[in-house]
Structure formats: structure tokens, C-alpha cells
Image (cartoon, rainbow, N blue to C red):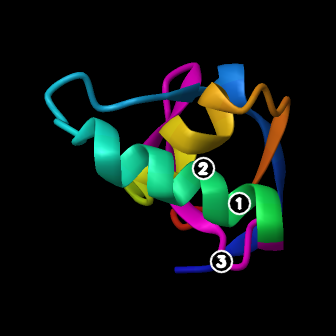
Amino acid sequence: MSEKTCYLFLDAISPNRRCLCLDQELEQLCDSLRRMGQQEPIRVRFGRRVFFIEDGEKRWRACNKLGHRTIYVVISNL
């Protein structure tokens, strides 16, 4: 199984609708992303037409909330 690291548009990634993030945790992560940027990529897999998040749901949500257009990812099922 090979992996690829790249940037993807946020709207190409489907969030997990069942994931619950506390507002306080999300705000703390947003503050961290504003100060330091994204330090680690999220992990996604490709399915039919979109990418699905395997790890990094909160980082995706924080980037989305901050208005970022892209996010650093590892695609795990190439």
C-alpha cells in the first residue's frame, strides 16, 4: 500500500457527520493553527468521488472554520 502527501481542497474531502467536536476544543485548535499553521497532515482515503477522513477530523473542521481553501493530507490507499 503506497501513500502520497499533498495539499487538497477542503471541499474535496467529506467530513464524518457523526463526529462531535466540542466548541472549546475547536477554538483552541483554531488558535493554534493561526499561530503555528498546520504542523501535521490529516490522513484521508479516496472513495468513489471524494476523500474521506481517517484521522484529523478536528484539524479539517478548524481549517474550514478559519476559511482555508486547502489542507495538507496523506492519502493512504493509493
Where, by quadrant of the figure, is residue 40 drawn?
bottom right
Q: In front here: 47 or 68? A: 68
Q: Amino acid at mark 1?
A: Leu
Assign the C terminus to one quadrant of the image. Answer: bottom right
Q: Say if residue 57 shows up in the picture.
A: yes
Q: Position of residue 69 (x, y in %)?
A: 85, 29
Q: Amino acid at mark 3?
A: Glu
- Residue located 22% across and 42% down the image: 22
Side of 9 relative to 73 (left or right): right
- Residue located 81% across and 33% down the image: 68
Please tell me whether mark 3 or mark 2 is closer to you in this view. Answer: 2
Residue 56 falls within the magenta-colored stretch? no
Q: Position of residue 37 (x, y in %)?
A: 81, 66
Marks 2/1: CA–CA distance: 5 Å
Residue 44 falls within the magenta-colored stretch? yes
Q: Position of residue 27 (x, y in %)?
A: 47, 45
Q: What's the magenta region?
A: 36-53
* Residue with the mark numbered 1: 33
| Disc 1 packing (10 Å; few <14; some 14–19; many ≥20) | some
* Residue with the mark numbered 2: 30
Is disc 2 in contact with disc 1, using a CB cutoff of under 8 Å?
yes
| Disc 2 packing (10 Å; few <14; some 14–19; many ≥20) | many
Q: Earlier in the sequence, mark 3 or mark 2?
A: 2
* Residue with the mark numbered 3: 40
Q: Earlier in the sequence, mark 1 or mark 3?
A: 1
Above or below, comparing residue 47 to residue 71 in the picture: above
Q: Position of residue 52 (x, y in %)?
A: 44, 39
Above or below, comparing residue 27 to residue 40 in the picture: above
Q: Secondary structure at mark 1?
A: helix
- Residue located 64% across and 29% down the image: 64
Q: Say if residue 44 shows up in the picture.
A: no
Side of 5 relative to 76 (left or right): right
